[in-house]
Amino acid sequence: MLARLDLRGFSGDLAARLARSRANGDEPIEAVRDIIQNVRDRGDDALREYTERFDGCVIDDFAIPTGDVSASLDAVTPEVRSALEYARDEIRAYHEAQVTGPVDLNRDGVRLRELVVPIGRVGCYVPGGRAAYPSTVLMTAVPARIAGVDEVVLCVPPARDGKVPTATLAAAALAEVDQVFRVGGAQAIAAMAYGTPSIPRVDLIVGPGNIYVSTAKREVVGDVGIETLAGPSELVVVADEQASAELVAADLLAQTEHGPDGAAVVVTWSESVATGVDAAIAALLADSPRRADIEAALATGGQSVLVDGPEQAMAVANTIAPEHLELMTADPESLVPLVKNAGAVFCGPLASAVIGDYVAGVNHVLPTGGSARFSSALRVDDFCKRVHVVSMDDAALRRVSPYVQAFAEVEGLGEHGRSVALRETDR
């Protein structure tokens, strides 16, 4: 029997009534964390132990020989191979269409569409404490509104007097934020993820923050979406012998004044530039109003990297995968094709990362902590979901049915096959 939930006449909290029960109670968070840490510490030895424990087999070599993989094509039945090839081609066609979008394909009677649906409620986190960040209000709320998000709420840490900077509130008004809450840190992330009597639960949390905010965002993933792990600020400057040491130093200080735990790295093949940057940092720090914060950040994240030349410099930058990457070289455009991992790239001596922070128009909510290896700057797409829509005619059903049956048989899922077979016999 199916569990019955009668919502006739119901006008309360639908999310609470429709919440799914957890099959096994709380997730095994600590067990999973232990496994992850053990694999990080012990590598293949840990994998072998877990494979024997959980899968019941002893594996010496995890890699399956390439020849065995290729030979498997001849080992499967013709029906299975045909089904695999057909599915591959259809999947490829649909996802190739996503590149140009919007998707609306007709594949021999199978119509494939993609609905772009804005996320319902978004929570924007804007840091506070050391500084006011009205720019981050704009960077998070404006693209959310463009995407068509129904409701935008904002959390920002209050000052000791309980107030939020006027400029931050002004930015919220201009960006049409629906509600502003004076709460910050990990507690704000938790409030937006799960809701409180004061703060509504959101569907997506965006915005940068310190290590506590980033950690909290990582912990709530799955209960709520996040755009990326936008944590402490990072800058890598690739500089050649013609770069101005003062400008390099100024840009490093500009990013480190956000506070600790970030990165400020100059990568150069000129020892004189490296030495000059050190001297320029010392000179500029003398009258910096945030000297203590900058010195603390430089003590843990400041670095000068000497390399053989431009290609190695870009390899270093791609390995760091920084939030901001500045190319202060005579020909920065020649290095752009070598960029693989970076949140944003700034070319030449005039394009400071600070311009991107404020007024260039690009978003300054960027991936940090090396996450530029797999994530991107905040964009309108982050505030939308894509919903597949599939429809088909009789001929298409008959044409694809053999492929479905082949998949169902090889995967041991008989009800999948019957689901399609019944549609054929009913028509």
Image (cartoon, rainbow, N blue to C red):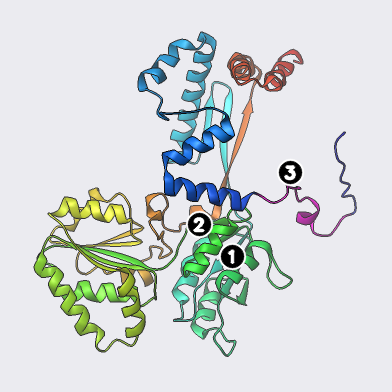
Point out the frontmost of discs 3 and 1.
Answer: 3
| Residue denoted by label 3 | 23
Measured as percent of width and height from the top left, residue 241 is found at 9, 65
The amino acid type of the residue labelled 1 equals Gly
Residue drawn 50% across and 61% down? Answer: 143
Would residue 277 be seen by someone viewing this image from the given angle?
Answer: yes
Q: Is residue 372 above or below residue 86?
A: below
Would residue 148 be seen by someone viewing this image from the given angle?
Answer: no
Q: How crowded is mark 1: few (under 14 residues within 10 Å), some or many (20 or more)?
A: many
Which element type, helix, strand or loop, lies under badge 2?
loop
Q: Which of 381 and 46 is in front in this view?
A: 46
Measured as percent of width and height from the top left, residue 119 is found at 60, 55
| 327 left or right of 406 in image | left
User: Contact, CB < 8 Å: mark 2 with mark 3?
Assistant: no
Residue drawn 56% across and 88% down? Answer: 160
The amino acid type of the residue labelled 3 equals Ala
Question: How would you classify the magenta stretch by its main secondary structure?
Answer: loop
User: Contact, CB < 8 Å: mark 1 with mark 2?
Assistant: no
| Residue segment shown in magenta | 10-27
Which label is found at residue 123?
1
Q: Is residue 151 magenta?
A: no
Which element type, helix, strand or loop, lies under badge 1?
strand
Q: Residues within 10 Å of mark 2 (few under 14, many from 20)?
A: many
Q: Quadrant of residue 255?
A: bottom left
Measured as percent of width and height from the top left, residue 284 is found at 23, 83
Q: In which quarter of the image is the C terminus?
A: top right
Q: Does the magenta stretch include residue 25?
A: yes
The amino acid type of the residue labelled 2 equals Glu
Which label is found at residue 167?
none
Q: Quadrant of residue 396?
A: top right
